[in-house]
Amino acid sequence: MKLEGIHHITAITADAPRNVDFYTRVLGLRLVKKTVNQDDPTVYHLFYGDDEGSPGNDLTFFEYPGAPRGRPGAGMVYRVVWRVGGDDALGFWEERLRAEDASARRADGSLVFADPEGLEHELRADASGDEPLLADHPEVPAEVALRGFDGVRAFASDAEASRSFLQDALAFDARGGAEWEARGEARGGTYALDAPPSERGVGGAGTVHHVAWASGMNEHPEWGRLAAAGGATPTPVVDRFYFRSIYFREPSGVLFEIATIGPGFTADEPLETLGEALSLPPNFEHLRDRLEQVLTPLPATRPARR
Ligand code: ZN
């Protein structure tokens, strides 16, 4: 039993309108779900991804309006790594991101940049063989578009404890150094641990809240049992409506989620209009009138490919 790579990554924004602009207009992702934080429905939970809203290309943001910038430290993911086509794609994004003042810098076979709130991203040439998960965008040719997640990098507080947990409890494969891969039948995703900075991490705008790994529907409850057997303290299964979730911290402190591949974002709206209207899970629907008055107005996003 293996996890199918990364399902989604959730980060924090203090500026939802600018966040929508950056991830849809600049990076070319599709806003696939505009919903509310199920723990505080007066603020958004925004989901960006490919045109299908697939697990594997799904970056999500909790909106904490006015929150100060955070700073990644031990026990936090500090970088999101994406797949792109190759060197031509790195050149395309270097030019496009420089024009947006996103401080893009080329490194060994990759391009590193930050979003407007300091969240770090890296683009790498895709060597995975996995199906590219693409969003159509008029200014971003498919050959250079983001293809989905390659992995995340986090700061370790206890890399040795993480090693045995990742390999023995979660069946990640060692890739040498402090890097692992969760590869299932269809997709894989990597997890890399680096030595933490001396300063303590602070959650806030521009930081990652958690990383979710993808599970098939039937084996999902078993992952909670395996995490517990490995010494973690998993939550019960939580129904997030678009998927079911189990949460726990791996030994270095990073918050992990195991999320089911279905039912997915077409559970309450058609694929053609994903993300255009405010989606509320059924138990929040009675709050719609009030929420539509208090939620931050967002810029319109382009309709997806028809
Ligand atoms: Zn999540």
Image (cartoon, helix red, strand yellow):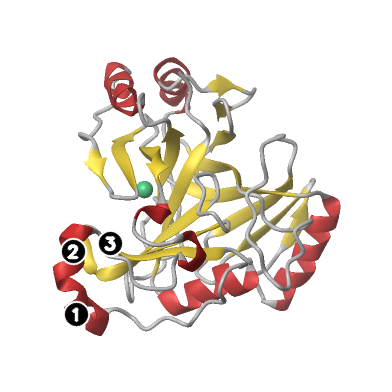
Whether residue 215 is visible here, answered yes or no, is yes
Residue found at the very far right of the displayed protein: 88
| 232 vs 68: above or below | above
Disc 2 and disc 1: Cα gap in Å? 11 Å
* Of pointers 2 and 3, the one earlier in the residue sequence: 3
Q: Which three-letter amino acid code belongs to the residue tagged 3?
A: Asn
Question: Where is residue 33 shown, x and y percent of the image?
Answer: 41, 63
Disc 1 and disc 3: Cα gap in Å? 16 Å
Of 49 and 15, which appears nearest the observer? 49
Of 106 and 140, which appears nearest the observer? 140
Looking at the rendered structure, the number of numbered marks drawn on it comes to 3
Secondary structure under the numbered disc 3 in the rendered image: strand
- Mark 2: give few (<14), some (14-19) or many (20+) Cα within 10 Å: few
* Of pointers 1 and 3, the one earlier in the residue sequence: 3
**Circle number at residue 2:** none
* Residue topped by disc 3: 37
Q: Which three-letter amino acid code belongs to the residue tagged 2?
A: Phe
* Image quadrant in which the C terminus is located: bottom right
Q: Is 271 left or right of 137, judged from the image as shown?
A: left
- Mark 3: give few (<14), some (14-19) or many (20+) Cα within 10 Å: some
Q: Residue at x 71, y 58 (%)?
A: 145
Closer to viewer: mark 1 or mark 3: 1
* Image quadrant in which the N terminus is located: top left
Q: Is the residue under label 3 in contact with that under label 1 (CB below 8 Å)? A: no
Q: Which three-letter amino acid code belongs to the residue tagged 1?
A: Asp
Some atom of ligand 1 lies within 8 Å of the CB belonging to the residue at label 2: no
* Of pointers 2 and 1, the one earlier in the residue sequence: 2
* Residue topped by disc 1: 289
Q: Residue at x 36, y 70 (%)?
A: 68
Question: Where is residue 256 shown, x and y percent of the image?
Answer: 37, 38
* Residue topped by disc 2: 284
Whether residue 208 is visible here, answered yes or no, is no
